[in-house]
Amino acid sequence: MTCGDWAVVAGTALGITGTLGSTILAHFLTNQKQARIDKARKRLLRKALTRAGNTGWMSVETLAHIIGSDLDTTRTLLIEIEARGSMRTDKEMWSLISRNALPTGPNAE
């Protein structure tokens, strides 16, 4: 191979490495940003459910509005903070398990 051929090979390798590196970095930074957002959302959910009045229950719609998220993401984050749902009313309600433990027995929700 001549010197010019090596330059082409080196340039190609450098280009491929740069492209892959930038793609991996962009993916990493996006995931880091989402992790920070989710952490802040979980903190808001815990605070809202801790201060949820006498019953400790709040509707999933209200919780989604508080954290600025869709219902499915809100449900996922609620499970991650150890909350549970209830369908005893016409609305989907959620509470921290520490405030409203899971029912047991034959009449459980």
Image (cartoon, rainbow, N blue to C red):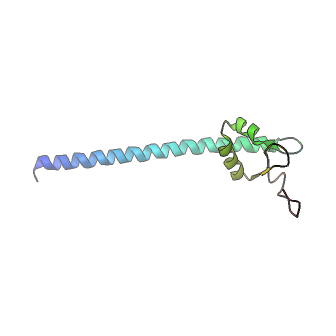
The residue lying toward the viewer, choosing from 65 and 43, is 65
Residue 25 occupies quadrant: top left
Q: Residue at x 58, y 45 (%)?
A: 35
Please state, as top left, top right, bottom left or bottom right, where the N terminus lies in the image: bottom left
Q: Residue at x 71, y 48 (%)?
A: 78
Instruction: List x then y, in percent, for residue 64.
Output: 71, 39
Instruction: List x then y, in percent, for residue 99.
Output: 84, 51
Q: Residue at x 78, y 45 (%)?
A: 92
Instruction: List x then y, in percent, for residue 88.
Output: 85, 49
Instruction: List x then y, in percent, for residue 24.
Output: 42, 47
Residue 15 occupies quadrant: top left
> In the picture provided, is 47 more to the left or to the right than 3?
right
Number of dots carrying numbers: 0
> In the picture provided, is 86 more to the left or to the right than 17?
right
Please state, as top left, top right, bottom left or bottom right, where the C terminus lies in the image: bottom right
The residue lying toward the viewer, choosing from 52 and 86, is 86
